[in-house]
Amino acid sequence: QRRRMVVVKAETINPEIRKTEEKVVDSVVVTELSKNITPYCRCWRSGTFPLCDGSHMKHNKATGDNVGPLLLKKQ
Ligand code: FES
């Protein structure tokens, strides 16, 4: 019986956001939110990064991935 070997190629998760920086870090200090919910992108596809613009839906459909935003919710 032959065994099939699956090779998983490591790929970067950030294809284009702020690539001139050594490490992309964003800080958010939350004392008050102007909206009830503020979505922050975690898929690196947003055109309004660091805010989510819904681009994760296209990415998920194309790749079978399941990423979504970080939601900051006002209490
Ligand atoms: Fe990236 Fe929504 S666009 S999580």
Image: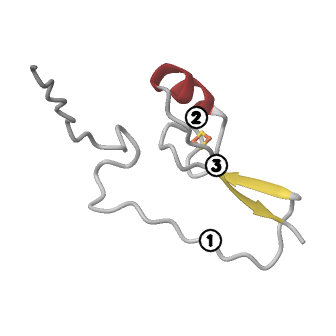
Tell me the SS state at disc 3.
Answer: loop
Q: CA distance from mark 1 to mark 2?
A: 21 Å
Q: Is residue 30 left or right of residue 16?
A: right
Instruction: Looking at the image, tell me whether mark 1 or mark 2 is earlier in sequence order.
Output: 1
Type of the residue with mark 3: Pro
Q: Residues within 10 Å of mark 1 (few under 14, many from 20)?
A: few
Where does residue 1 sit, x and y in percent of width and height?
10, 20
Q: Are the residues tagged 2 and 3 within 8 Å (C-beta)?
A: yes
- State the residue position of label 1: 28
Q: Report if the beta carbon of the residue with label 2 is closer than 8 angstroms to ligand 1.
A: yes
- Give me the residue at 44% from left, 65% from top: 25
Q: Residue at x 19, y 36 (%)?
A: 9
**Ligand 1 sits in which quadrant?**
top right
User: Secondary structure under badge 1?
Assistant: loop
Asked whether mark 3 and ligand 1 are closer than 8 Å, the reply comes as yes
* Residue 49 x, y percent position in the rendering: 55, 47
Image height of 11 relative to 73, above or below: above
Badge 2, how many Cα within 10 Å: few under 14, some, many 20+? many
Q: Amino acid at mark 1?
A: Val
Residue type for callout 2:
His
Which residue has dot 2 on it? 56
Image position, residue 22 (x, y; %): 26, 61
Q: What residue is shown with label 3? A: 69
Q: Which mark lies nearer to you, 1 or 2?
A: 2
Colour convention: secondary structure
In which quadrant is the C terminus drawn?
bottom right
Left or right side of 54 for 13: left
